[in-house]
């Protein structure tokens, strides 16, 4: 077997990197779901601390899951008495 005169002793000559052909990418055509479905029940709550652009004692409506999270975070009270109190305050 003849030795390659251009290769260093004990080393293989460099080879071309293999490139795999990727299928062409197509833009995704799937529609994203709406951020707030139309049939989500809204819950009224009294804002206990100024957050997310809401003033203290403001009455706001949030989807039930968000209202529950806000109550756990401590900045919203959805008890009917709390909402009635906030509504009774002068604007």
Image (spheres, rainbow, N blue to C red):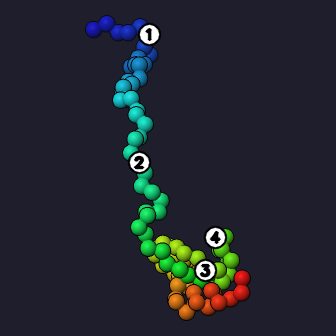
What percent of the width, then of the height, locates residue 47?
A: 62, 81
What percent of the width, then of the height, locates residue 14?
A: 42, 19
Q: Which residue is mark 3?
A: 59
The quadrant where residue 1 appears: top left
Q: Earlier in the sequence, mark 2 or mark 1?
A: 1
Q: Nearer the viewer, mark 3 or mark 1?
A: 3
Q: Earlier in the sequence, mark 1 or mark 4?
A: 1
Q: Nearer the viewer, mark 2 or mark 3?
A: 3
Q: Nearer the viewer, mark 2 or mark 1?
A: 2
Depth check: give the residue in front, 42 or 51: 42
Q: Secondary structure at mark 2?
A: loop
Q: Nearer the viewer, mark 4 or mark 2?
A: 2
Instruction: Identify which residue is drawn at 40% across, 33% down.
Output: 25
- The answer to whether residue 8 is visible is yes
Residue 52 bears which disc, if any?
A: 4
Q: Nearer the viewer, mark 3 or mark 4?
A: 3
Instruction: Identify which residue is drawn at 52% across, 89% down.
Output: 80
**Marks 2/1: CA–CA distance:** 58 Å
Residue 6 bears which disc, if any?
A: 1
What percent of the width, then of the height, locates residue 42?
A: 48, 74
**Marks 4/2: CA–CA distance:** 29 Å
Q: Earlier in the sequence, mark 2 or mark 3?
A: 2
Residue 31 bears which disc, if any?
A: 2
Query: Badge 3: how crowded within 10 Å, few (<14), some, or many (20+)?
Result: many
Q: Secondary structure at mark 4?
A: loop
Q: Earlier in the sequence, mark 3 or mark 1?
A: 1
The quadrant where residue 88 appears: bottom right
């Amino acid at each position: 077997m003849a030795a390659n005169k251009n290769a260093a002793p004990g080393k293989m000559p460099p080879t071309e990197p293999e490139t795999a052909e990727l299928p062409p990418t197509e833009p995704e055509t799937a529609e994203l779901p709406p951020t707030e479905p139309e049939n989500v029940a809204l819950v009224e709550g009294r804002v206990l601390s100024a957050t997310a652009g809401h003033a203290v004692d403001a009455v706001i409506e949030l989807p039930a899951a968000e209202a529950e999270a806000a109550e756990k975070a401590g900045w919203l009270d959805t008890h009917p008495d709390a909402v009635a109190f906030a509504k009774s305050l002068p604007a």
